[in-house]
Amino acid sequence: MSDPSPAPGYSGLPVNAAVAATREVGVLVFRPLEIDTWQEHVIYMHPDCTVCRAEGFSAQARVRVQIGDRSLIATLTLLGAPLLSMCEASLSASAARTLAARAGDVVHVTHAPALESVRALRAKIYGCHLDSAQLDGIIGDISAGRYADVHIAAFLTACVNGRMSLRETVDLTRAMVRSGERLSWSREVVADKHCVGGLPGNRTTPIVVAIGAAAGLLLPKTSSRAITSPAGTADTMEALTRVTLDAAELRRVVEQVGAALVWGGALSLSPADDVLIRVERALDIDSDAQLVASILSKKIAAGSTHVLIDVPVGPTAKIREDSELERLHIAMVKVAHAFGLKIRILRTDGSQPVGRGVGPALEALDVLAVLQCRPTAPVDLRERSLLLAGELLEFCGVAPAGQGQLQAGRLLDSGAAWARFQAICEAQGGLRTPGQAVFRRDLAAARGGIVTSIDNRHIARAAKLAGAPRRQEAGLELHVRTGDEVAAGSLLCTLHAQASGELEYAFSYALAHDPFRIQ
């Protein structure tokens, strides 16, 4: 049996105090090891400690961990000497932050409460329909951190491919709204714009929000980080300003400048959604019902009244056919109607990426170029942003029918939208210049001809392998669009990375899965 004294270098309680603390069953002393498990809560304990022996804990057990008046549910990993002694416990970085743990803190560990909602989860796996109470139970346990990732993954996969009815989707949305706080605003019209994703570089939201705010709309925009793409709106905005704001800070910014562009995960609006997104990212899937519930629960919780949904449709986009769009349209409209939310869905071209940059910093540079009306700004990103902004202005009643795009263009060209964007960023913590990648490598055309198609999935995958969105500066810069004529050796794209290994990995993938079809 290992020595019960603390491991070498222990900097918490004195040895005798630490040993005395562990005489109470279920109590250990915290030792920081700084193990990063992303957002998954893990506790590390010695396999021979009195807690494991008394409680019968084994690896992968779900346990309740408490420090002071804070507690959470974590997965147990057994870790022996020399990293931990029998009177010590450690926590993953995310769990330590949540519990505000400091070296020497007394840690209480007990069995996690039984999860009654797992019965409903198993029923869904076998194809049963769930009622409102069952979905409330599942979402409540997910929000409270009681589900392990394996439970969340099982729930997500049990709901994909049309396995949830419209009634279940409404109830799922309601359960996700109930799981968190709701904001309210003293305005009849509170606008929002959202894209279902699947199109690299389609970073229109910051531009649309700036134009809408310049037109006098209230736009408390909360966005997710990337799920299956190289960047989400929150990732891109984080390359420009602070996006981690709490509800009070969000309200201050919106009341000050009329709009905000923040990460929804820092707020307690539909908190279960952020947990589900984390697991969806690992699985690289988007459940159709979860997509609807995810989007609309956040809009309802944020206090939105009018929501414009951008749905790109294309052979390599998330929505590939009009029949898929029709199913999504029906679900979105009916769920929105159940909550009194006004919604407008706009079909857009999803045949190829938008703009030049793919990845947080590169997309941020495109956004700045459009807002500053630079001659080199991507024309397609500008035109798409004006289309969406015009629709939003008409939908919310600040522009006459058929005049929205013209009014949006005036607000952009006059500099009003750029001024409002700067004000938003300053209110959130200041506007900064996006960083640049250390390593770059060009992909050239093997032969001459016309670029007939660009595969969105391969572009996105190459950018992700280069390090996006985890590394802000990483991604991919496009040099051609469909219809362009290229010669052999012409540049098609440039990969950007912060690590040489990631650059080579991404380049090898791009060579093996050429995203550009040239004929």
Image (cartoon, helix red, strand yellow):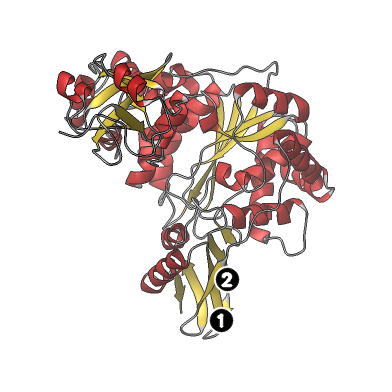
**Which residue: 54% across, 55% down?**
359
Could you tell me residue 201's position as x and y percent? Answer: 56, 55
Could you tell me residue 308's position as x and y percent? Answer: 58, 35
Q: Mark 1 falls on what kind of element?
A: loop
Chain-order first, disc 2 or disc 1: 2
Q: Does residue 116 lie above or below 212 as drawn?
A: above
Q: Nearer the viewer, residue 20 or 426?
A: 20
Q: Which of 234 and 266 is in front in this view?
A: 266
Q: Pointer 1: residues within 10 angstroms few (<14), some, or many (20+)?
A: some
Q: What residue type is labelled 2?
A: Val
**Which residue: 72% across, 56% down?**
369
- Image quarter of the N terminus: top left
**Which residue: 65% across, 21% down?**
248
- Disc 2 from disc 1: Cα separation: 9 Å
Q: Does residue 422 lie above or below 191 as drawn?
A: below
- Residue 207 lies in quadrant: top right
135 sits left or right of 59 in the view: right
What residue does disc 1 label?
A: 490
Q: Mark 2 falls on what kind of element?
A: loop
- Residue 302 lies in quadrant: top right
Q: Does residue 109 lie above or below 431 as drawn?
A: above
**Which residue: 25% across, 38% down?**
79
Q: Nearer the viewer, residue 514 or 57?
A: 57
Q: What residue type is labelled 1?
A: Ser
396 sits left or right of 12 in the view: right
Could you tell me residue 224's position as x and y percent? Answer: 51, 38
Q: Pointer 2: residues within 10 angstroms few (<14), some, or many (20+)?
A: some
Most extreme residue toward the right is 414
Q: Can residue 129 be seen in this view?
A: yes
Q: Does residue 311 lie above or below 459 as drawn?
A: above
What residue does disc 2 label?
A: 480
Q: Nearer the viewer, residue 78 or 385?
A: 78
